[in-house]
Image: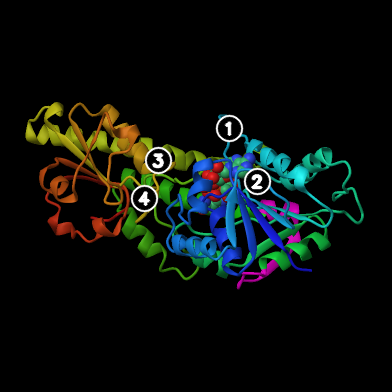
Amino acid sequence: MSFNTISVIGLGYIGLPTAAAFASRRQNVVGIDINARAVEAINRGEIHIVEPDLDTVVKQAVQDGFLRAATQPVAADAFLIAVPTPFKGDHQPDMSYVQAAALSLAPVLKKGDLVILESTSPVGATEQMAQWLAEARPDLAFPPQAENPDIHIAYCPERVLPGQVMVELIKNDRVIGGMTPACSERACELYRIFLEGECVVTNARTAEMCKLTENSFRDVNIAFANELSLICAEQGINVWELITLANRHPRVNILQPGPGVGGHCIAVDPWFIVAQNPELARLIRTAREVNDAKPHWVLEQVKAAVADCLTATGKRASELTIACFGLAFKPNIDDLRESPAMEVAHLVAGWHAGTTWVVEPNVDAIPAKLAHEATLVSQEQALQQADVLVMLVDHHAFKAVSGDRVAQRWVVDTKGVWR
Ligand SMILES: NC(=O)c1ccc[n+]([C@@H]2O[C@H](COP(=O)([O-])OP(=O)(O)OC[C@H]3O[C@@H](n4cnc5c(N)ncnc54)[C@H](O)[C@@H]3O)[C@@H](O)[C@H]2O)c1
């Protein structure tokens, strides 16, 4: 049984590449988004996000008539929901976007349809979504209540790396968590349209937890490296050398420290586990706290460097220029969302009485958050004229500068680029 029409709800960093991947396999795809400007752009064959190769696939798919976008759900045979799942102020998951998406598609559901939740979600979210749908459509039978449900429902998380989405979407293995074995089978059938990786079948709760576990694993391991960097600074040990040496052990593989942990996945998803298991998730919570505290520790390092510089040069603080290198949340991208480097630059600029410069080769203008407190300058200007340097992101452009070219005595290097 094939799918005549596939609908993807939420056309952002995950939804649009997924819609494009189906459409590029000559499937009839309707993408739904509440953002009318995104919908208009896609219908013109353009994209509203930055992701390599996505523009050409979308353009071709729209031109060939396999992909179109709309602001309201229409009837389809499979629906994939990829809307945001942020956390609220108290670190509780905010499922309101998923609820709104589910309720918006409920009126067009028909017997035999498949509904897949792709948004990163707390355990039990798929059952909750099925319940919302069942309440909205009492005329249809849903799992887990019905033995032979009219609607198949599954949770299938996404684990792609921004910047490589069009490759990883196709090649990565996919965890398929159906609410029943038949739901899993139908979901596998759908993904096999473009998937070259394996469909690995489990139940919905395990699939939900699997996604949260993957990002918590990364967060805990980065927190270990970040904690080591604090301890090493206190003990007068070079943390980069230490990690290189320790990793010579055949069963040790320590990650690299940095200014904190950013992005909208690793810094968010572990809180979903903590929110549901506050007494048990002690290590996961502590890792979040260690990583969230790192930008403040970097500020203290900057303060110490500035104090030393003032003593050595006899200058006043207002005469000093601090240059922060990098704002993105990871190397060689322009994404500044939830970036610890942005946070450090903001903390430094807010504290420093003199001039704060930022160097970010991947953006053209100073971000609004820093507009009134810092100036975007070139790498050369910062290297030649700043008094104190703060290295925050290991962009290629920064790594290309050899340590010998860095004349400043006061360098706070959170990435070990100019060690
Ligand atoms: N970006 C990643 O690298 C990544 C990786 C794995 C998992 N995820 C998860 O995937 C989900 C989506 O993330 P994203 O990065 O694509 O988000 P995004 O913000 O880029 O896109 C979400 C889109 O959903 C739209 N939307 C919101 N409510 C809607 C509704 N009711 N109906 C239709 N459209 C609606 C928004 O307008 C937006 O265009 C999240 O749960 C995220 O945690 C993201």
Quick one: label 3 or label 2, which is nearer the N terminus? Answer: 2
User: Where is 11 relative to 98, above or below?
Assistant: below
Whole-angstrom CA distance, mark 1 to mark 2, is 13 Å
How are the colours assigned in the image?
rainbow
Residue assigned mark 1: 88
- Residue flagged by tag 3: what amino acid is it? Lys
- Residue flagged by tag 2: what amino acid is it? Ser
Q: Can you give x and y, in whole percent of width and height, for residue 173 in the image?
A: 62, 67
Helix, strand or loop under label 1: loop
**Bounds of the magenta span?**
192-209
In the visual, does 8 lie left or right of 241? right
Looking at the image, which is closer to me, 154 or 388? Answer: 154
Residue 197 on the magenta span: yes
Q: Can you give x and y, in whole percent of width and height, for residue 255 in the image?
A: 43, 58
Whole-angstrom CA distance, mark 4 to mark 2, is 26 Å
Residue appearing at x 18%, y 47% in the figure: 378
Residue appearing at x 89%, y 44% in the figure: 139
In the visual, does 382 lie left or right of 9? left
Residue assigned mark 2: 121
Residue 217 appears in view: no
Looking at the image, which is closer to me, 276 or 264? Answer: 264
